[in-house]
Amino acid sequence: MTTGAGTETKLRRDAADNHRRLLEAAVAEFSEQGMDACVEQIAARAGVGIGTFYRRFGTKDALVERLVTDLLDELVGSAERRIAAGDGDGLESYLREVATALVHHRGVLARLWSGKPAEHAERLRPLMLQLLAHAQAQGTIRPEVGGNDISVLMWSLRSIIEITGAAAGVACQRQLDFVIAGMRPGAEPLRHPALSDRARLKAEHRTPSRH
Amino acid sequence: MTTGAGTETKLRRDAADNHRRLLEAAVAEFSEQGMDACVEQIAARAGVGIGTFYRRFGTKDALVERLVTDLLDELVGSAERRIAAGDGDGLESYLREVATALVHHRGVLARLWSGKPAEHAERLRPLMLQLLAHAQAQGTIRPEVGGNDISVLMWSLRSIIEITGAAAGVACQRQLDFVIAGMRPGAEPLRHPALSDRARLKAEHRTPSRH
DNA sequence: GCTAGAGTGGAGTTCTGATTCCGCTTAGGT
DNA sequence: ACCTAAGCGGAATCAGAACTCCACTCTAGC
């Protein structure tokens, strides 16, 4: 649940403790201040000096990447669990879980769907496609819906979450109500083509704003 | 089309020219670099010195606010045009126009739905509500849909646009296909409550990240 | 064509926040 | 209890970008 990369060479007890505390402080601080939260604040909140922060993470960017990786691990785990369950509305449940996870990690969403860890995001795609295919086989999602439609849907949650802050959970679930309703077999026909794979790939490799 | 505030005390011809060029350069630079585009770059792109930039706008922030105001004027104009037209799918057409406008001004979206110009955004709301009411009276949108649902929908476009960059137009229209389909009278019932007015107001007054 | 004053350019200043450095502390093996 | 390398704190350094200032250059009214 905590991580996947194994670069942790058993720390001294106090050090391990500081490490954990830094991670918690970072999540909190990023949630509140956005990605501009400054390192000094994070360290202060964790009750350690800046030096300790840098000994542990090397760079503010490395910290963010670590948080993003944790989040992706969570999303992957969630997808796998849904696939294992094998019920008809697996995709819908999955999307709702994704929304919840994103809300919880709202501080680092700006880095989630682009930049380096895009490789990680690739890990998610086949699982998502599998859930989609299953839902379509069960007839709960109409056949014209493609994987890129689901990607766009997930992307769209980011700004809702960043704008609504505390109320993000409600806002996302309601939005999912509408989008999913629009993806059901009985819904009105689609007027526009889906995003192309080429465009999706370009989007996933874009390096966004900051630094 | 250019603006609404009338603080422009007829400039010397060359100055007016530089002013226009700065505005264009700013839109371009923000679109490409995001809100972190630096003033020096903008000035360079416009072919003027930094001094000129500051004489004209006083502050980077003032420039952004000006661009946001222009965008809102455009959105208001669009809504008024739709209301005047009075056809049944006014809301849908309006939303699609909004998407197009947002794509064009993608550089400043981060400042659009929050911060100071929230007052301006208030100008938009009654128009949007009117379009919604009309659509519901015509039976093209189901009655459970509320104004806040439309707000959330507009917010959701921001991250789609920022992530997809050049392909944003396609992505947004397709997403609108789904959401609007989900808002039709025949669509599946909604499972979750809409965002409360209180939460929406809080969201609109949030001061986001930067500065 | 001349002149006043609006406009200009861009080096220098200031501010903010990331990152480095190093002498001091402390866990934990013996 | 002692020793030593892992850890720690935080002042000092560095970097990047916003913003200021002022000697100099043109536009436009005469």
Image: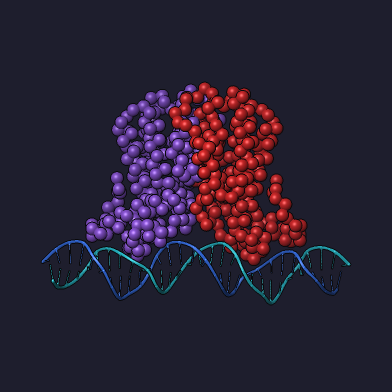
Chain colours: A purple, B red, C blue, D cyan
Name the residue: 40% across, 35% down.
A96
Picture residue at 61% right of the left edge, 60% below the top: B59
Q: Position of residue A50 (x, y in %)?
A: 37, 63
Residue B122: x and y in percent read 61, 42
Q: Is residue B97 above or below residue A55?
A: above
Horizontal relation, residue A176 to residue B130: left or right: left
x, y percent for residue B92: 60, 32
Residue at 40% of width from left, 61% of height from top?
A: A40
Instruction: Examine the rendering and report whether any part of residue A171 can be seen.
Output: yes
Q: Quadrant of residue B11?
A: bottom right
Q: Outermost residue, front direction?
A: B198
In this orientation, which residue lies closer to the viewer: B16 or A13? A13
Classify D13 as above or below B159: below
Res B164 seen here: no
Residue B172 at x, y = what percent? 54, 38
**Residue at horizontal 59 percent and vertical 43 percent from the top:** B102
